[in-house]
Amino acid sequence: MKLDKVIAVRTAKTIYRDGDKVIKLFNEDYSKADVLNEALGHARVEETDLHIPKIHEVVKIDGKWAIVMDYIEGKTLEQLMLENPEKKNEYIELLVDLQMQVHAHKAPLLTRLKDKMNRKIDQAEVDATTRYELHTRLESMPKHNKVCHGDFNPSNIIITPDGTPYIVDWAHVTQGNASADVARTYLLFYLDGDLQGAETYLDTFCKKSDTAKQYVQKWMPIVAASQSVKGKPEERQFLLGWVDVVEYE
């Protein structure tokens, strides 16, 4: 395998292209369990009819773990939004349609979103009272078992030359309440500085799915707290600001 064409650099991992394959190479100190769990979660989603890259193998390269999967030719929805700003609302509508397709599926063996969020809340840099309120709110939310991508944003949608949309980067996939996944996407727009995009996205999703906006907003503090754990320092402060939205009862 050739590691000479870098296509993306992420925290603790680098993504290379080698012909018709992508090699996601993790740092030496990256948890073996996390790599194998990511590959397993991705494989669970492969069993649905969603358009996603197929994993070919999990290997070690020079002492580092790597996941090898299909390379998907095309442009990301993020690129298309930048190139065609007049079509942004149209692209956001496509984003919502694709996310609703994901939520329409079930994969019973995936990690449960509530379990993952409870663990993350325990690790969040908030006081015990806030953690208690977040755990309480999380437990009170309706229990669903829909596939939730966990990082659903325009950079993770690739449109192939023939117009087929592929969804990539399933590292955070779980099963649970779709509105938590929506709250995460909303916050990702905000983290990217696109406040108008965030509001357009949320309005579009709520209208298309007939979901009350207030219901998604109830998830915001929970999702923000769970995402703050591994976030960049500047993102962490922003996310913890959303945690303060908790309504104490």
Image (tube, rainbow, N blue to C red):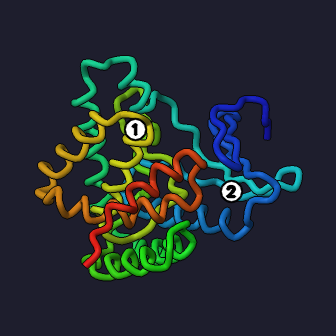
Report helix, strand or loop for mark 1: helix
Query: Crowding at label 1, few (<14), some or many (≥20) Cα neighbours within 10 Å?
Result: many
> Is residue 94 positioned above or below 172 on the image?
above
Position of residue 10 in the picture relative to residue 205 (left or right): right
Report helix, strand or loop for mark 2: strand
Amino acid bearing label 1: Pro
Rendering coords of residue 149 (x, y %): 42, 57
Most extreme residue toward the right is 62
Q: Can residue 105 be seen by looking at this rendering? A: no
At x 46%, y 72%, the residue is: 117
Q: Which residue is mark 1?
A: 154
Q: CA distance from mark 2 to mark 1?
A: 26 Å
At x 50%, y 73%, the residue is: 127
At x 70%, y 47%, the residue is: 13
Quarter of the image with the N terminus in it: top right
Q: In the rendered image, which quarter is residue 34 located in?
A: bottom right
Of 159 and 222, nearer the camera is 222
Q: Which residue is mark 2?
A: 57
Q: In the rendered image, which quarter is residue 215 located in?
A: bottom left
Front: mark 2 or 1: 1
Position of residue 237 in the picture relative to residue 208 (left or right): right
Q: Are marks 2 and 1 in contact (CB under 8 Å)?
A: no
Q: Can residue 27 be seen by looking at this rendering? A: yes
